[in-house]
């Protein structure tokens, strides 16, 4: 079970890296790369699966899961996914503010993951 959990941790990290890198790379273009929306949806799905596995098998660290942190990360991840999908659907007419909000919320989600103990 721990191996499966670690597979989804890897997918979660790789998906957020795709969102972060794709957002930065698309700042100089008129559109948002399609991979950003795929990465955001993948990161949200992998995160949900990780929580499910941890709930079924018990926390691997021996402590309880912090549901407040998980809730905040879920809301931010879903916001990033929705904004990324909207930006990709706009095509070449994406405002810099929309692309910046995808990048900013991605950073917020990473900061919550790292610094919320």
Image (tube, rainbow, N blue to C red):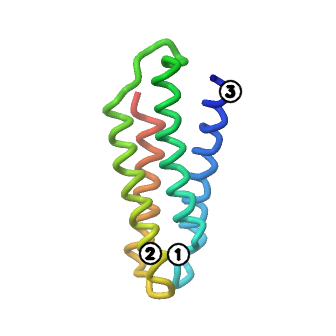
Relative to 102, say whether 8 is above or below: above
Asked which secondary structure carries label 3, the reply is: helix
Asked which secondary structure carries label 1, the reply is: loop
Q: Quadrant of residue 100?
A: bottom left
Name the quarter where the C terminus is drawn: top left
* Residue 90 percent location from the top left of the image: 44, 82
Relative to 11, say whether 79 is above or below: below
Relative to 108, say whether 29 is above or below: below
Mark 2 or mark 1, which is nearer the start of the sequence? 1
Instruction: Estimate the spatial distance between the alpha carbons at disc 2 and disc 3, rounded to whole Å.
Output: 35 Å
Name the residue that disc number 1 marks.
32
Residue positioned 60% across, 66% down in the render:
35
Q: Is residue 8 left or right of residue 112?
A: right
Residue positioned 50% across, 56% down in the render:
41
Q: Crowding near pointer 3: few (<14 within 10 Å), some, many (20+)?
A: few
Asked which secondary structure carries label 2, the reply is: helix
- Kindly indicate whether the residue at mark 2 contacts the one at mark 1 (C-beta within 8 angstroms): yes
**Extreme-bottom residue of the structure:** 93
**Which of pointers 2 and 3 indicates the residue nearer the eye?**
3
Residue positioned 45% across, 71% down in the render:
99
Name the residue that disc number 3 marks.
3
Instruction: Compare residues 25 and 93 and report the one nearer the observer.
Output: 93
Mark 3 or mark 1, which is nearer the start of the sequence? 3
**Extreme-left residue of the structure:** 68
Which labelled disc corresponds to residue 87? 2
The number of callouts visible is: 3
């Amino acid at each position: 079970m721990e191996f499966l959990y670690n597979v989804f941790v890897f997918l979660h990290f790789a998906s957020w890296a795709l969102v972060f890198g794709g957002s930065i790379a698309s700042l100089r273009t008129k559109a948002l790369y399609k991979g950003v929306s795929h990465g955001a949806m993948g990161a949200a799905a992998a995160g949900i699966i990780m929580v499910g596995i941890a709930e079924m098998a018990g926390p691997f660290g021996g402590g309880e899961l912090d549901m407040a942190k998980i809730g905040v990360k879920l809301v931010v991840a879903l916001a990033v996914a929705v904004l990324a999908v909207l930006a990709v659907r706009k095509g070449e007419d994406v405002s810099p503010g929309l692309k910046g909000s995808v990048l900013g919320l991605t950073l917020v989600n990473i900061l919550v993951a790292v610094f919320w103990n």
